[in-house]
Amino acid sequence: MKYLIKLILIPFVLSGCSATHDGYFLSPTTLSSNNFTYVKKGLKGSAKATYFLGMGGLHKQTLVYAAKRNLMSDTLLDGQAMANITVNWKTTYGILIITKQCTITADLVQFK
């Protein structure tokens, strides 16, 4: 019996977590000429979902929306726009649990 318990528990104890990262860069705002100034740099919004046995959590589009909502806590004024937008994903794999985190970063610019 002790051998069977060790046989079952050892893989769970020795297996750790792993994580993967990916992301992409979006630039809907064109900053090709010198007609803007930076208002704030490095604004960040994030959202996280946890899945147990593949169930629960939020869909990918919902995570992006929640991260964007956290990023855009203040409303933009006339002549302002988000620039240098990046969307990064981190997925952490555990034994029975998967955690996905979406982080969006951007710079706030004011056009002249």
Image: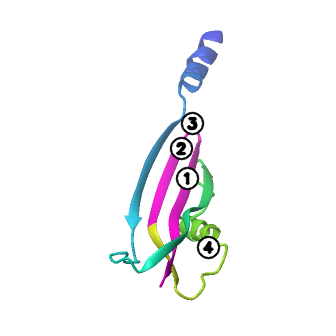
Up/down of 50 relative to 74, above or below: above
- Mark number for residue 100? 1
Q: Tag 4: residue type?
A: Met
Q: Which residue is mark 4?
A: 72
x then y, percent, for residue 29: 41, 77
Mark with earlier residue (3, 1): 3
Q: CA distance from mark 3 to mark 1?
A: 14 Å
- Mark number for residue 110? none
Mark with earlier residue (1, 4): 4
Q: Are marks 2 and 3 in contact (CB under 8 Å)?
A: no
In-front residue for pair 24/6 = 24
- Mark number for residue 95? 3
Residue closest to the far bottom? 78
Mark with earlier residue (4, 2): 4
Write down the region rendered in magenta: 85-112
Secondary structure found at label 1? strand
